Amino acid sequence: MKFTVLIILAVILVSCGATVSYDYDAKTDFSVYKTYDFYPNISSGLSNLDTIRVMKATDSILQLRGFEKNDSPQFLINFFAKEFISQSNTTIGFGIGGGGHNGSVGVSGGVPVGGDIINQKLTFDFIDEKEDKLFWQAVGEDELKVKANSLQKDAYYFELISKMLKGFPPKK
């Protein structure tokens, strides 16, 4: 019984979580970048509150790594999101069956549980301010419940952006 519970828990933990990918210009010297700021008119595709959440999480993570937000930045950050709402993949199944005398009949189905979820794809672009050139990009995809409260959204964005910025700056 304990083994079954451990397998189920492991499957849940592996299936949950963000998918993140990075891309960058290999010719870029990342050691020169110390200061950043956000584009002044970001059109993120998110609500104003979620845009602020993304900026606060990004500030917190980058500043912990020694970067400084500055009015004369070396690089600018742009971000945007695409999202769509879908039903939860979690269902409770039920079935009816019978058989005998060389025949059988079966009926089964599932009822969605957990409510609707937001499938979100968040993209970060880091652009060299002087050269106006994209030098690093991260894309993260994850799910958030539609009915998430503000604390859950704060935690969601912090966790997603932490995973996205884990690859910045790239290790040589």
Image (spheres, rainbow, N blue to C red):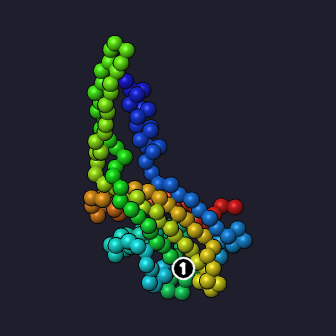
Tell me residue 35's x, y (percent). 55, 78
Q: Is residue 155 visible?
A: no
Q: Nearer the viewer, residue 104 or 148?
A: 104
Q: Is residue 3 above or below residue 91?
A: above
Q: Nearer the viewer, residue 10 or 74?
A: 10
Residue drawn at the location 40% of the way across and 37% of the way down: 9
Q: Is residue 41 above or below residue 51?
A: below
Badge 1 marks a residue whose secondary structure is strand
Tell me residue 63's x, y (percent). 49, 71
Q: Nearer the viewer, residue 73 or 47?
A: 47
Tell me residue 34's x, y (percent). 58, 76
Q: Is residue 54 visible?
A: yes
Figure quadrant of residue 158: bottom left
Figure quadrant of residue 154: bottom left
Residue drawn at the location 46% of the way across and 63% of the way down: 121
Furthest residue toward top: 101
27 sits left or right of 56 in the view:
right
Crowding near pointer 1: few (<14 within 10 Å), some, many (20+)? Answer: many
Tell me residue 148's x, y (percent). 29, 59
Going by the numbered disc 1, the residue's amino acid type is: Leu
Question: Number of callouts in the render?
Answer: 1
Furthest residue toward right: 27
Give the quadrant of the N terminus. top left
Residue drawn at the location 34% of the way across and 44% of the way down: 90
Give the quadrant of the C terminus. bottom right
What residue sits right under mark 1 in the picture? 76
